[in-house]
Amino acid sequence: MNSGNIEIMFASQDSKSLDPALLKENIARDQALILAERENDFPGIKLEKTAIRSYDNGQIFSGVIGYDGKITREELKDNTNYLMTDYIGKNGLEKSYEKNLRGVYGATQLEVDSLGNTKRTLGIINPQPGSDLVLNINGELQKKIFDSLNEVLQKTGVKTGAAVAIDPRNGGVLAMVNLPSYDNNLFAKGISNEEYKNLISDPDLPLFNRCISGTYPPASTLKMAVAAAALSEKTITPETIIDGLGGALHIGSFRFGDWKVHGPSDVRLAIAQSNDIFFYTIGGGYGNITGLGMSRMKKYENMFGFGSPTGIDISGESAGFIPDEEWKLKKIGEKWYIGDSYHASIGQGFLTATPIQLANYTASIANGGTLYSPRIVNRIKKNDGTEEIIDPKIINDNFISADVMKIIREGMRMTITDGTAQSLKNLPVEVAGKTGTAQFGTEGKTHSWFVAFAPYNNPEIAIAVIVPGGGESSSGAVPVAKEVLDWYFSQDKN
């Protein structure tokens, strides 16, 4: 550091503060030895040793763990027990659990004369380590999803993707993968301006956590919530048959097409084959069936957690969005048309959701109707040997009857046996799932979604995969889930 930089740095400090200011970090060992030998020649300058983070498999786990970095002056105002030379959690678990992870400084108590010379040592206060976090994350599963998603991105030429896996029995987050990723060791060791500039200028946004912050139209993955609403509101019964209408529904001069021609379907088959005509009808109404309308669809989608943050234990989560008639009138200046309800009934239009919401919703279907707030941390091991268990937190439960949930799960199982994801038919366990292809933009591009849970009769994992811009589910998200679930249930669980 040259003298000009030192002058600028001191000019920016509070002249009344006794806190030390950091001149230079990560100095080489030979430089440190020279300073140590000549400490008396540089009064006021002190050489300090400190620990820095070393993250194993940083690229794979950075979206979960986050990183810590040098504290800013603004952060110092809210953390008065920190020094200007300290590091503090910036995102991920490092930020959320900063108070637990941080220990307590040790100190040497000295008697000094009026010139600041040490006369004698009065005592030593031993430092205290911070707590350890024990995670719900399955490290091998995280690595497998990372590799499988990476492979699909390379095959499709798509640059981004995300996947979340949740334990439906307690809401524990088993894996959370965001691509492209970044190496959090860069921050731990003091990232250079050039390295940081490369990260923030990358158009694929490696620092953006799509799992919790990315919002996308959920497409047909939302159809289970719409079906649950229609069954609960008695708009249809489990035996109601709706005709496929030759692949299109007409209202006046407007045509609402299906992605393929379907025959007559009940609700289970409509879920399995992703029958748009069926869902247009129960969502907006047609013929002798009165549609739910947006208000009632929104009511049930909110129950499943859409439109609100899940409360996962890292920051930066988006709420997604479920519209209604009043919002459209106020925001766009137009009334709500039946076509809006048709689009909403198949997860298109104004609706958006995050991958964590889709995984959590799928988990609630898998477990019969309990919506948990997802948790990455399982327990906190304190330095005194005690443990703080992070109990599961329930957001909502018993909001859909057991009979309706059973029908929804049967439809998701038929997706695998007779529907749009038959490539998962021969996995080691029975899987239930739902494909989704979300249109976006004006160029006919689509996001590839797939949600699933397994084993069908005793679920222990729910997963949501999205490949934004990845085309059809069969070429994007489905292969990832297939490979991951095949691997997961082929492992020795002991």
Image (tube, rainbow, N blue to C red):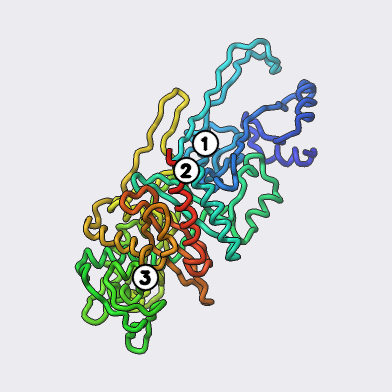
Quadrant location of the N terminus in the rendered image: top right
Query: Which sits earlier in the primary sequence, circle 2 or circle 1?
Result: 1
How far is the residue under mark 2 from the one under mark 1? 33 Å
Q: Which mark is residue 390?
A: none
- The residue mark sitting in front, 1 or 3, is 3
Look at the picture and state if 388 lies above or below 163: above
Q: Which residue is mark 3?
A: 274
Name the residue rendered at 76%, 41% in the picture. Answer: 5
Q: Nearer the viewer, residue 443 or 424?
A: 424
**Direction from residue 321 to residue 295 in the image, left or right:** left
Residue 457, position in %: x, y? 31, 52
How far is the residue under mark 1 from the one under mark 3? 52 Å
Three-letter code for the amino acid on which mark 1 is drawn: Asn
Look at the picture and state if 230 lies above or below 277: above
Three-letter code for the amino acid on which mark 3 is drawn: Ser
Q: Which residue is mark 2?
A: 138
Query: Which sits earlier in the primary sequence, circle 3 or circle 2?
Result: 2
Q: Which residue is mark 1?
A: 79
Residue 437, position in %: x, y? 45, 69
How many numbered discs sit on the rendered protein?
A: 3
Query: Which sits earlier in the primary sequence, circle 1 or circle 3?
Result: 1
Name the residue rendered at 47%, 66% in the picture. Answer: 473
Three-letter code for the amino acid on which mark 2 is drawn: Asn
